Image (spheres, rainbow, N blue to C red):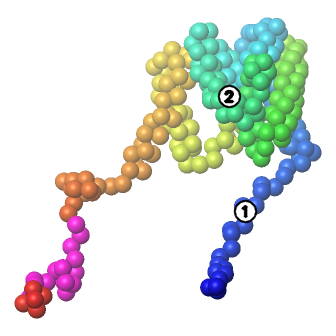
Amino acid sequence: MPEQTEIRTTERAAPPPPAPPATSDAAVIRDALGVGIAVGLSGFAFGVTSAGVGLSLVQTCALSLLVFTGASQFALVGALAAGGNPLTAAAGAFFLGARNAFYGLRLSAVLGYRATVKPFAAHWVIDETSAVTLAQPDRRTARLGFTVTGLTLYVLWNLTTLAGALGAEALGDTEAWGLDAAGPAVFLALLAPMLKDTVERVAAGLAVVLVMVTLPLLPTGVPVLVSALAAPAVLVVQGRRGRPAQAPGAGPAHDAGPPARPEGTPESRPATEEDRA
């Protein structure tokens, strides 16, 4: 009976990749509350600015309750404060808030809410809730972060909007107190931390240049729309720089012949009589 030999391999299976560290509910709630409180207090500046441009208390509070996207609200009242047409101001605010639709596409897959819940959750899809949600490692903590951030920010933003509008009415002329600069200052404070790399800073700088150049030439509110062209312009330039350089007159790489072989190799020297034999 032939002997059977056992062949063993010394190779071992690679260990599974380490699981992402778990995030406690307390840490998620702490981060969500921090973001919600820090940004929610900015509603006071919006209430003051909105009342200062002539919007009533009801109109100011309705913007925060129904629109609830801070940057777009500041853009709207800023354009109105500069004497812009209401339709132009609304168009600028609309295009600025359209980014939330792209956030929603990503968050829809992360949160996995049912179709009946999505319309209500969509009202809280803004920069801050998206940042907290996407930072979580799993769906459960993502839902927790989204809910706590959205609820905290929505309640506090509307309360501070009301307080700011009531305070502005009590003060009277907000420009005499210098509060007309509160809106732009808060908007810049919210925008500055988002500019993390060179491309974003260049796009923001180009947008400022476009506004400054077109401000004396175009109707109020239109320069804000023109400044939106800065982002695609910077991306186009970046894409062209990222392409590999090609020598002028050179054809495609696949059209080039085979690489030359060094002299002395059997393929490069002529065949001799010994080689033919």
**Residue at image mark 1:** 16
Q: Position of residue 77 (x, y in %)?
A: 69, 17
> Mark 1 vs mark 2: which is more N-terminal?
1
At x 72%, y 36%, the residue is: 110
Above-or-below relation of 105 to 163: below
- Number of numbered callouts drawn: 2
Secondary structure beneath label 1: loop
At x 72%, y 62%, the residue is: 16
At x 48%, y 30%, the residue is: 229
**Closest to the observer, 90 or 272:** 272
The amino acid sitting under disc 2 is Gly
| Category of crowding for the residue at label 2, using alpha-carbon neighbours closer than 10 angstroms: few (below 14), some (14–19), many (at least 20) | many
Residue furthest right in the image = 26
Q: Position of residue 213 (x, y in %)?
A: 47, 28
The amino acid sitting under disc 1 is Pro
Q: Position of residue 210 (x, y in %)?
A: 49, 30
Question: Does the rendering let one see residue 194?
Answer: yes
Q: Where the N terminus falls, by quadrant?
A: bottom right
Secondary structure beneath label 2: helix
Q: Which residues are magenta?
A: 258-272
